[in-house]
Image: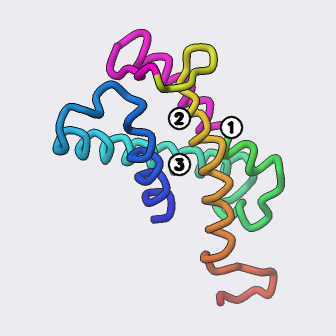
Amino acid sequence: MAGFVLSAAWEFAHSPLYTDHLRGVGYVLWTRLHCTAGDVLILVVAFWVTGLVFTGRRWYERAHLWRVGTFTGLGLAYTAWSEWFNTTVRGTWAYTEAMPTVFGLGLTPLLQWTVLPPVVVLILRKVAPSHGTEGHAR
């Protein structure tokens, strides 16, 4: 749930940096929710791949730099590819002149995937029940 809320907030906040933000409230609402769903899918896939690499779905309980870096890096790598592919190859979306870019890629989507995964890990560590070594569920 935290991933959805954080992603939705980010998507709506950087909406004016995309050329379609003036196409009407209904269109913008639908596209930003669609993008949020995609963000959540990226988070889930990156989370599970990180779990496969670090032997378990509760990898975030011992969220060392390599684990959080893997989680973050997976989302960031996919996003960099997706931004390039959708702005350059397919032309699915475009940036306004206000969008800062790095190597032609929008900076705010890249920042999203640098900031949100570590925040999601912090939230998980606070709200997810801990499974210690006591041998029983809490």
As drawn, is 10 to the left or to the right of 117?
left
Magenta segment, which residues? 74-97
Vertical comparison of 31 with 103: above or below: below
Specify the quadrant that holds the C terminus: bottom right
* Residue at (47% x, 48% y) in the render: 10
Residue 73 is marked as 1
Measure how far apart labels 1 and 3 are at the Cα level. Answer: 11 Å
Residue 109 is marked as 2
Residue topped by disc 3:
43
Camera-side residue of 83 and 63: 83
Vertical comparison of 118 with 17: above or below: below
Among numbered discs 2 and 1, the one appearing first in the sequence: 1
Q: Are marks 3 and 2 in contact (CB under 8 Å)?
A: no
Q: Which residue is outermost to the top?
A: 89
Identify which amino acid the numbered label 2 is placed on.
Pro
- Look at the image and say whether residue 92 sits in the magenta stretch: yes
> What main secondary structure does the magenta stretch of the protein show?
helix
Identify which amino acid the numbered label 1 is placed on.
Gly
Identify which amino acid the numbered label 3 is placed on.
Leu
Secondary structure of the residue carrying numbered label 2: helix
